[in-house]
Image (tube, rainbow, N blue to C red):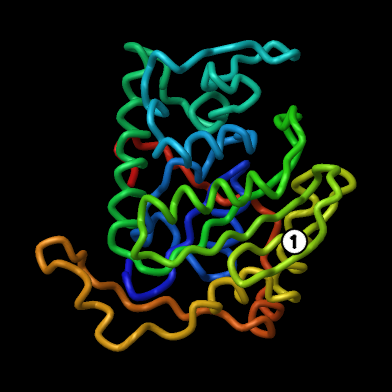
């Protein structure tokens, strides 16, 4: 990852932020070296996202906070017992054949400790970060009114922990019936897109709406070009191997390369994923 390029950090509440950022060329694929962060691939209510942001992901990989519950249809769901309406669906069948529950959640703990450290290390390196949050009720997850104060609390948590870094927050309200209007104040952007029907049928029109409105691109490019000598902020012993800077796509080019609706594989099948 090039630390002079804006870093996009998916915050849930589902896989879409990682999917969208990758489809539109703002993030590399995992197989091309992109690191996985803790909220890339789970269903989480906004209350859980806010709590983890405010507490630096403390306890997320602690087996004492994990619970396997039964869905109304009978299948097991792995979740955080503090927020049982969420779901680590990529760590349970049929998404994986690996057993993340065995040995007191050993593989889960290893995976999420690694993902948390991935995030912390990249946030320490980058000076421009876009947080990408989805607010939805696809899982019936949000059981309290989501407010703009939640958005402010989330971005402020990162700003306080990394004071030398500029943060932006993109909030996609995709199905949650709240009267939070579209807005963009240069720091937090809210974009509404209301679904009607099965989620997977609307991945393509949703991504096209983000593309045509330059929703993600405008947030990424709001930082402007890197300041002269910005790489000198990195300590030589901690600087990563530099990859080629991402070429951030224009709305016209995105439209010409409309993404298909097939789901992006985020978690892979190997316990030592990035």
Percent across and percent down for residue 239 are 18, 66
Q: Residue at x 14, y 67 (%)?
A: 235
| Front residue (pair 160, 182) | 160
Give the labeled residue for mark 1.
Answer: 191
Give the position of the N terminus as an image quadrant: bottom left
- Say if 166 sits above or below 225 in the image: above
| Front residue (pair 161, 33) | 161
Q: Residue at x 60, y 34 (%)?
A: 44
* Badge 1: residue crowd in 10 Å (few <14, some 14–19, many ≥20): many
- Mark 1 element type: strand
- Say if 264 sits above or below 240 in the image: above
Residue placed furthest toward the right: 196
Percent across and percent down for residue 127 are 36, 68
Find residue 95 and report its image quarter. Answer: top right
Percent across and percent down for residue 193 are 81, 57
| Front residue (pair 185, 3) | 185
Percent across and percent down for residue 256 are 69, 81
- Say if 4 sits above or below 79 in the image: below
Whether residue 205 sits left or right of residue 258 in the image: it is right
Tell how many labels: 1
Whether residue 162 sits left or right of residue 206 in the image: it is left
Residue placed furthest toward the bottom: 228
Q: Residue at x 62, y 60 (%)?
A: 170
Q: Residue at x 15, y 61 (%)?
A: 238
Whether residue 93 sits left or right of residue 235 in the image: it is right
Residue placed furthest toward the left: 237
């Amino acid at each position: 990852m090039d630390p002079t390029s804006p870093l996009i950090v998916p915050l849930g509440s589902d896989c879409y932020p990682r999917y969208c950022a990758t489809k539109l060329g703002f993030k590399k694929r995992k197989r091309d070296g992109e690191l996985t962060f803790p909220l890339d691939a789970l269903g989480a209510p906004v209350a859980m996202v806010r709590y983890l942001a405010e507490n630096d992901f403390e306890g997320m990989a602690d087996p004492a906070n994990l619970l396997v519950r039964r869905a109304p249809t009978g299948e097991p769901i792995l979740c955080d017992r503090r927020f049982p309406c969420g779901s680590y669906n990529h760590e349970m069948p049929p998404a994986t054949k690996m057993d993340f529950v065995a040995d007191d959640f050993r593989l889960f703990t290893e995976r999420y400790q690694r993902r948390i450290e991935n995030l912390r290390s990249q946030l320490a390196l980058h000076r421009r970060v876009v947080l990408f949050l989805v607010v939805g009720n696809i899982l019936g997850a949000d059981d309290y009114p989501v407010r703009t104060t939640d958005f402010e609390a989330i971005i402020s948590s990162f700003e306080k922990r990394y004071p030398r870094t500029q943060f932006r927050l993109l909030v996609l309200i995709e199905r949650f019936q709240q009267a939070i209007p579209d807005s963009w104040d240069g720091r937090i952007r809210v974009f509404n897109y209301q679904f009607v029907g099965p989620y997977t049928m609307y991945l393509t029109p949703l991504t096209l709406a983000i593309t045509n409105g330059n929703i993600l691109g405008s947030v990424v490019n709001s930082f402007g070009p890197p300041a002269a000598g910005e790489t000198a902020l990195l300590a030589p012993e901690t600087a990563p191997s530099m990859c080629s800077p991402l070429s951030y796509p224009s709305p016209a080019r995105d439209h010409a390369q409309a993404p298909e609706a097939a789901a992006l594989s985020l978690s892979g099948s190997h316990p030592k994923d990035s």
